Amino acid sequence: MSALPPPEDLRHEGGGDLTRGPQPKANAQRRNKHPTAATLPAVPQPGRELPRGLGITTAGARRFWLTWSTAPQTAEWAETDWAELEITTRLVDALYQGDLRQAAEIRQRTAKWGATIEDRNRLRMKLEDPEDGEGQDQAAAELAAADLDEELYRLLSGEGG
């Protein structure tokens, strides 16, 4: 049995592509840019100190706070966003103390801030690399110095802390 040729309305003018409509012009420009799309410079922000009143006890939660409090997304945060970070940091502290039920809630909360590339694409958020090559500051040095291996080992081995 021989294959039937595609109907004429499924062909481009110059060939047999199986897409509808005319071929786009070579100089075509997209006009559907979303009006609320955000472009942020991918440089660490000044951040805030971890509030002592939160009672954070684990290095993992302190690292989480440092990571998020200096993230580029915080440049546009309001006080309510900082309050959400405080609550989420408490959940992360509980996670590192062994309450693994907190993982899903933490993931949902951080997704709203644009934690992963997929989250940022969904939020129409783009991080641009700095042009001057900067980006290493005190916060980045503190992140590199945070040693979580022992704490994670205790958590995963069931030793607790």
Image (cartoon, rainbow, N blue to C red):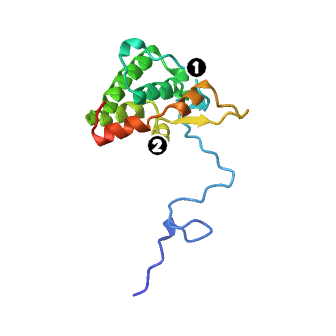
Is 161 positioned to the left or the right of 18 in the image? left
| Residue bearing the label numbered 1 | 46
**Amino acid found under the numbered disc labelled 1:** Pro
Query: Which of the 4 image quadrants contains residue 37?
Result: top right
Where is residue 25 drawn, in percent x and y? 65, 55
Look at 30% across and 42% down and name the residue there: 157
Point out residue 92 in the picture as x, y percentages from the top left corner: 36, 29
Name the foreground residue: 58 vs 127.
Answer: 58
Assign a secondary structure to mark 1. Answer: loop
Mark sitting on residue 118: 2
- Badge 2 crowding class, 10 Å Cα cut-off, few under 14, some 14 to 19, many 20 or more, is few
Asked which secondary structure carries label 2, the reply is helix
Who's the residue at 73% across and 32% down the image?
A: 132
Q: Which residue lies furthest to the right in this view?
A: 132
* Screen quadrant of the N terminus: bottom left
Image quadrant where residue 12 sits: bottom right
Q: Which residue lies furthest to the bottom in this view?
A: 1
Q: Residue at x 48, y 27 (%)?
A: 68
User: Which of the numbered marks, if any, corresponds to residue 145?
Assistant: none
Give x and y (percent) for residue 144: 55, 34
Work out which quarter of the rendered image holds the C terminus and state it.
top left
Q: Nearer the viewer, residue 69 or 38?
A: 69
Observer-side mark, 1 or 2, equals 1
* Disc 1 and disc 2 in contact, CB within 8 angstroms: no
Residue 138 location, quadrant: top right
Residue closest to the eye, 33 or 43: 43
Question: Which of the marked residues, 1 or 2, is nearer the chain's N terminus?
Answer: 1
Q: Does any portion of residue 52 appear in the rendered image?
A: yes
State whether residue 100 is above or below residue 25: above
Near mark 1 (Cα within 10 A), the count class, few <14, some 14-19 or many ≥20, is: some
